Amino acid sequence: MIKEIQAKTVLTHHEDAFPTNWDLNPYRGCTIGCKYCFAQYSHYYLGFDDFFKNILVKTNVADRLAIELKSKKWQNEQIKIGGIADLYQHAEKKYELLPQIFDVIKKHRNPIFIQTKSTLILRDFDIIKELSKYTTVDISVSICTLDESIRKVLEPGAAPAIQRMEMLARFKGICRSTTLAFIPIIPLLSDNEKNLNETFRLTKSLGIDNIVTSFLHLRNKGKASFLETIKTHFPHIYQEFSQLYTNSTLNESYANTIKAKIVKLRNEYDLHGVFVPVAKAVQPQQLLLF
C-alpha cells in the first residue's frame, strides 16, 4: 500500500550525529526490505503494521524543505537524506522526489549527505554532479555482505553489493567524500575472512575514500524477528548466533576479535579516513547599542 501524505515538517533533529544531526526522509516505510532494519517498528506509532509494504510518500517534501531552509533559525547545517528509509527505494521511480529536493538544496546551497543502497541514484548522476558545484555533497552506500545468497535473504530489495560499490565509485571526485558503510557486520554470516578481506580490497581498488563498520544491533521486537530469519534461512548457525546475542549487542569478546581483524585490514589497505560533517554556519552577532 502506498499512501500520499502532506508533511507538516520534513527536517528532523537528533542529538547524536549519524553522521549528521539533521535527517530528511521523503518516504516512511521502505521497499528495500532489510531484515535487520532498525526502523521497521517505527511504523507502529503511525498505525501501520508493515514497514516494508506500507509506504508513506511525502509528496510536498520539496515545498516544505524550501520553507524550512528559509527559516531565520536555520544555520545551514548538513542534512542527511535517507536516514530512516532509503531515498531511492522503488517508489522513487514513480514520484521522482529527489530531483525536486536537489533543486531546493541547490538554491539554498545547503550541504547534504546522501545515504542509499540503491543504484537508482545513477538516474540523478548529472543532477548531483551539478549540485556539487554549489554545495558540499557527501555520499555513502551501505552493504552487509558480498555473498549474493545471503544478500538475497537479508536485503531482498537491494542491488547486489558489488553493483552498489561500483556505483559509489562513480561519484569519486564529484562528491566531497565517498564512504562505504559496511553496516551491519553480521556474525557468522558476513564476518568471515573472505568477506572481510574482499570488502576492504574492493573499497581500495575502486578508489572509495573511506569505509566505516558497525556490528548488528538487535533491539526490542527486531531481535525476535531477526532470530526467526536466521532460524529459517541459516539454521546451521542459529544456536551459536543466539548465544552471541543474549542482549541487544554482540558478545564483547567475539566483537573484539572481529575488531582486531578490521584494524589489521585498515592498516593493510590504508583506509583510515574519518568522516567530518560540514560545520554549521555561524550567525552574525548583533552589535550592542551601548
Image: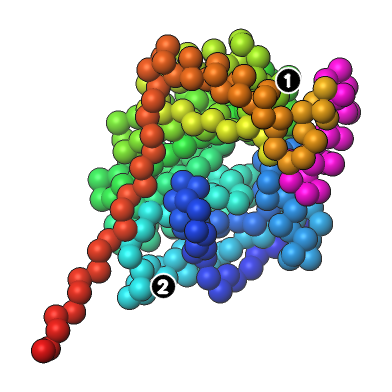
Element on which disc 2 rests: helix
Magenta segment, principal secondary structure? helix
- Density class for disc 1 (Cα within 10 Å; few <14, some 14-19, many ≥20) is few
* In the foreground, 63 or 186: 186
Whether 38 is drawn above or below 171: the answer is below
Where residue 245 appears, x then y in whole percent?
77, 33
Give the residue displayed 30% in from the left and 31% down from the top: 173
Residue 167 position, x and y percent, is: 47, 28
Residue 246's place in the image compared with 279, above or below, is above
- Residue 276, by quadrant, is top left
User: Magenta residues, as a range?
Assistant: 218-239
18 and 167: which is toward the camera: 18
x, y percent for residue 42: 71, 57
Queried whether the magenta region covers residue 96, the answer comes back as: no
Q: Which mark is residue 188?
A: 1
**Which residue lies under the disc numbered 2?**
67
Write the residue at 77% across / 28% down: 244
Residue type for callout 1: Leu
- Reply above or below: 5 against 139: below
227 or 40: nearer the eye?
227
Q: Quadrant of the N terminus?
A: bottom right
Q: Image point 50% across, 58% down: which residue?
A: 15
231 is within the stretch colored magenta: yes
For the residue carrying disc 2, how many other residues have a C-alpha within 10 Å: few (<14), some (14-19), or many (20+)?
few
Q: What is the distance, in whole Å, between disc 1 and disc 2 at their CAs?
A: 47 Å
Q: Name which residue lies at 61% across and 24% down.
A: 256
Tell which residue pokes out farthest to the left in this image: 290
- Residue type at mark 2 is Ile
Seen in the image, is 22 located left or right of residue 130? Answer: right
**Comparing labels 1 and 2, the label whose residue is closer to the camera:** 1
| Quadrant of image for the C terminus | bottom left
